[in-house]
Amino acid sequence: MFADRPSTHSRRAWWWAATTIVVAIVLYWPAVDVGFLADDVYQIALLDGLAGPRAPWELYSLYPLDPAATAAHRAQGSLPWWTVPEFRFVQVRPLSSLLLALDHALAPRNPLAHHLHSMAWLSATLVTAHLALRRATTPTIALLALAVYAVDETFGWTVAWLANRCAMISATFAFAALAVYQRRALAASTTTSTTDLRHFGLELTLWVLAFAAGEYALCGVAYVLAHALVGRTDAWRRRLRALLPATLALVGFAALSIAVRAGVHGATSYIDPLGHPVEFMLAGIDRIPRMLGEIWLGLPAESERLLFRYEDSAVLRAIAGLSNASGPPGVVQAHGRFVIVAIVALGLPAWWLARRNLSPTERRAVAWTALGSAGALVPLAAILPSTRALALAALGPAVFVGSLGVASVRALRPRPRQPSAWLRGLSLAALAGTSLLQHLVLDAPWARAQIAGIGSTGRSYLRFHDSPQSRDLPLGDKHVVVIAAPGLVTGLHGRWILHLLGRPLPRSWHALGIGERRLLVRRFDERTLEISTVEQAMHDQPQETLFRPPPEALHTGDEVGVGLFRARVMHEREGQGPASLHFVFDRPLPHAEIVFLVGGPEGLRPFELPPPGRAVMLPPPVLPDHRPYGD
């Protein structure tokens, strides 16, 4: 329908798209200074053969289902000692993995080159989004929607975190496939023509590449399905037949995922939709509305970011007012509920006012892209709401906001003669202006703040492990025992961060606890350390239950051995988790081969064991100079 535009319009559209891409690159440019972060350092260790055997296309197979390998990871500390034996974390992303391997082959230890590669994929994502938008709706709406789509916090994450580049790669090929699908769906040629067969093959290839980049391609398939349901008016047989390329790619991806035993087991933050469908649906009731709030209203999906961004504001008071609790607990409880209320209260009136100023084709484009966006959130409900996962889902809201902007101009030009029409036009302009302000103006500094926070976190990880007090310690071939680490990366990837820094590797790196909580450390006898929590339990935070879900929680009397020590639960807080643990080492303490460390304000420092029978209170471990939401 929009395939044959005058060349002048086409050139102008591409100039606008190019300008938008340049603005996006400038906006997200600070990401090139972030460096390697979290899983990046683990994948470097995999490529260097230090963390287990992996092919270059298997770098996202972080922890395959292999009890022997899991036991080896626990023994060296690259999985926490409490990890369930059947732990599995495998994602099928061969194309994204190969591109990471290529980065390291061409520019090892050069994060700038890797991030420039990510910037290229940002540009590619916006180019293919432009292609899809041009085929979905009219030129002006498509151009405004592209600008809205380009200014989004999700790109801060996907450009700044190299391991998360897969979301952009998958989105690039999914949008390209969507554009070809729309061409096929709207083509006048018959389904048996040479042209259609060529486009069929092209679309199938693009979907295969999208799935090869990552499971995010499922979000792209949601748009195709939505288009078949409400974006077309032809016979259902033709609509179903048009779905064949996406269906074939999806079936192939599912078969490969089953063959390699992909998925996650042992974690509560990740829910397998096929293995645990009831839990998945229940989790989606809360997770999907929170993600809707991020892409439609600009409200962060993560409650922690929401609390930070709107601290002491009317927004938080309004959210808490929908719950039975006050303060942060009330906000967390009513987060999703508030989003639904806000979307109904603001979105429906805006659509009612806008639709009379849009053509049937434009209204249909809003309908199917909005439905596709909602459908794209369904597979994402398998994980905790996360900005970094929303690159594909954010396209539908961009079309809606762009359509509101165009409709508001049409409503007020020419100037309405009737007061009622004038009032409707002004109301629509107010709603459209608010939406454009949120998505084009207010989101931009938060996207920059997101990147700054990611960079701050990465630098804090390095300072934590490379502190002045631990830098010169002889850790090579020793067993390092960190009494408590503040978070997931510091608890898991200590050896790999030292490898990144070029330091001799310890034989093992164990964090006895993960999380910012006060601990009482008592020397029980010459081989045993007793660690007790103050006021709260262990293993109750998402970063801890990632490795042992509550149904398999450790209870009083349970023991876990990892070679260097055996951990025994001495006491638990009912319904919460362990409160006191004994760590019985395989040799008398202190020992020349064991180095005890603890986190301080400047990072890791040596920990002097108290004499037998004595205890010491430790403050919560923290990352040095950490600013999670920017400097």
Image: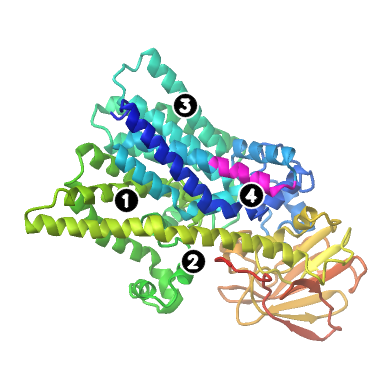
Q: Quadrant of the N terminus?
A: top left
Question: Horizontal placement of 244 versus 531: left or right?
Answer: left
Numbered disc in front, either 3 or 2:
2
Residue drawn at (67%, 39%) of the image: 58
Q: Nearer the viewer, residue 531 or 360?
A: 360
Q: Nearer the viewer, residue 579 or 501?
A: 501
- Pointer 4 with pointer 1, Cβ within 8 A: no
In the displayed orientation, state which residue is furthest to the left.
418
Q: Which residue carries the number 1 mark?
A: 401
Q: In whole angstroms, how far apart are the C-alphas of marks 4 and 1?
A: 40 Å
Instruction: For mark 2, give the secondary structure.
Output: helix
Q: Is residue 516 magenta?
A: no
The residue carrying pointer 1 sits among few (fewer than 14), some (14 to 19) or many (20 or more) residues within 10 Å by Cα, namely many
Q: What secondary structure is the magenta-colored segment mainly?
A: helix
Residue drawn at (31%, 25%) of the image: 4
| Type of amino acid at the residue the image marks with label 1 | Val
Q: Earlier in the sequence, mark 2 or mark 1?
A: 2
Q: In whole angstroms, how far apart are the C-alphas of marks 3 and 1?
A: 30 Å
Question: Horizontal placement of 345 versus 511: left or right?
Answer: left
In the picture, residue 182 is in which quadrant? top left
Numbered disc in front, either 3 or 1:
1
Q: Which residue carries the number 4 mark?
A: 88
Q: Which mark is residue 305?
A: 2
Q: Earlier in the sequence, mark 3 or mark 1?
A: 3
- Give the residues drawn in magenta, as a range: 109-121
